[in-house]
Image (cartoon, helix red, strand yellow):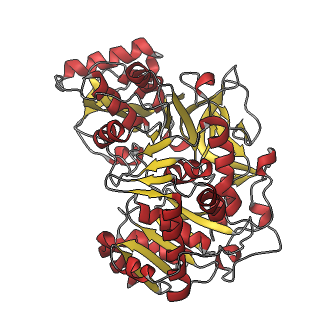
Amino acid sequence: MTGYTGHKDQFVRDHLPPRELWPEMVFSLPELLYPPKLNCAAELLDRTAASSPDEVCLITPTAKLTYRQLQRMANQFANVLVHDLGLLPGNRVLLRGPNHPVLVAAWFAVLKAGGVVVTTNPLLRAKELSEIIQKANITHALCDGRFSDELEKARSSSPSLKFVVYWGGDLEALAASKPEEFSPVETASDDPALIAFTSGTTGKPKGCVHFHRDVLAICDTFAKHILRPRRQDVFMGSPHIGFTYGLGGLVLFPMRVGAKTVLLERATPEILVEAIQEFRPTILFSSPTAYLAMSAMLAEGRVADLTSLRRCVSAGEALTATVRKKWLDATGIVLIDGIGSTEMLHIFISHTEEEVKPGAIGKPVPGYVATVLDEEGRPAPKGEVGRLAVKGPTGCRYLDDNQRQREYVQNGWNITGDAVLVDEDGYFVYQARFDDLIVSAGYNISPIEVEEALLAHPAVAECGVVGAPDPDRGQIVKAFVVLRPGYSPSAELVSELQNFVKGVIAPYKYPRAIEFCEHLPKTPTGKLQRSALRQWRGAPERGES
């Protein structure tokens, strides 16, 4: 880290892992050589507000904000934080609310004031909020008044949280009398800008610290070289801004080029397709599950026109060749696949539409390098499944968690926990999370591959595959299947699905147990929760052994 810091409160810097536990940082592109002093909020918001103040920035179903209007709101909020709430540069500020212009303005306000922003999903409960507040020693919170209950419950066990202000009333009232100008704090490029929380296998939150330069780095790698947005683009998507996938796709990437974003407080597939037809976005960020559901709507004639879209990004879970083909057939658009992590901030392996290879994620995004390591930490041969390892301009720095830091960063590499292989053309092919790989009778089986085979059957709407304990094989492949309308669960259908899979992939990979269900457990971002599937206790329809 540089010697200079704009932070008076050194809590986050003091609780970073020792420098020897950091990953090796790679700055191989000239655009990644940022100046020592940098405030990413000034770069993203103030620069465009100065050059194109009247350009529309944010759109909602009821309002439009220009870049200058958003800047004024952020400036007034920053003045509230500093002058009414005593924010010191380096203090942590929790944000809570749905995707909304006020949330975006608050995000920029915290960074302009030199704070460290901690954006949370509004679905989090008091216990989860308390753990985050305590872990990050959060001092301030700005929250949508409609989501106050759980935050108020969390305050009783959060002594560090001194100031809480709600928008939809109090925040706007305080801001109304504040100046519309605010000079951003002169932070260092390696001053902490945000802490993104993710849960590990224990369920305890892990705080991933990212710097001001990191925020710009993902704009100048994945967005610049893969997404290639233009100023006239209109962005839309389903992920919440509290997730780094949503932060990049709905705030950082469009604002880096002066484009527009449509913000939806709820974004189910049904809501998304209606909003696409109404607001005519050109770039969409969502999940494979959502693209599959929207493809079905198009195939059934329930959607009239999605022709405004020119680029669609899929991440958050594995994109199968089946989902990719269904979206292509329905829209004519090649999905841009990507794998990223909260620890790395955003996507680090992907492809352009011209470089797509069905069944593969892609290659390292310009600015990143990646490899596959075997159990001994050596590069694995092509075609052999191993651990995905990545280096780039962003990397893992856990807040006050050296044990997990040692697990995630090994010999300078970020070890993401993903099982992958590299094919003969140098493309990375996703297999599963390492914890999700199924080992049955000595065979390593990718649940993604089995899911893709099942999805090709006309009866299957959705499915999830996990390993189930078995005394003879160690594990067997078990599939949870949601059927399409017109199909009913039966022993005959179980056998039909099993035989179908045997005809698509190697027979030893077929699901020896199938359970029909009405829905699959998913995260708030729409990702399949395999851990929850493994805990389900149903009455599986067993096939041949």
Q: Residue furthest top?
A: 503
Which quadrant: the N terminus? Answer: bottom right
Q: What is the tally of numbered marks visible in this picture?
A: 0
Q: Is 331 displayed left or right of 184 in the figure?
A: left
Q: In which quarter of the image is residue 366?
A: top right
Tell me if I can see residue 428 in this picture: yes
Q: Quadrant of residue 383?
A: top right
Residue in view at x 66 percent, y 60 percent: 43
Q: Where is residue 142 in the image (x, y as percent from the top left)?
A: 44, 75
Q: Is 113 displayed left or right of 291 in the figure?
A: right
Which one is in front, 542 or 177?
A: 177
Above or below: residue 168 compared with residue 249: below
Q: Quadrant of residue 360?
A: top right
Q: Where is residue 436 in the image (x, y as percent from the top left)?
A: 49, 40
Residue in view at x 50 percent, y 76 percent: 76
Q: Is 482 displayed left or right of 249 in the figure?
A: left
Residue in view at x 80 percent, y 53 percent: 33
Which quadrant: the C terminus? Answer: top left
Above or below: residue 48 compared with residue 462: below
Which one is in front, 457 or 465?
A: 457
Q: Is 218 displayed left or right of 168 in the figure?
A: right
Residue in view at x 60 percent, y 53 percent: 345
Q: Where is residue 394 in the image (x, y as percent from the top left)?
A: 69, 53
Q: Position of residue 28 (x, y in %)?
A: 81, 44
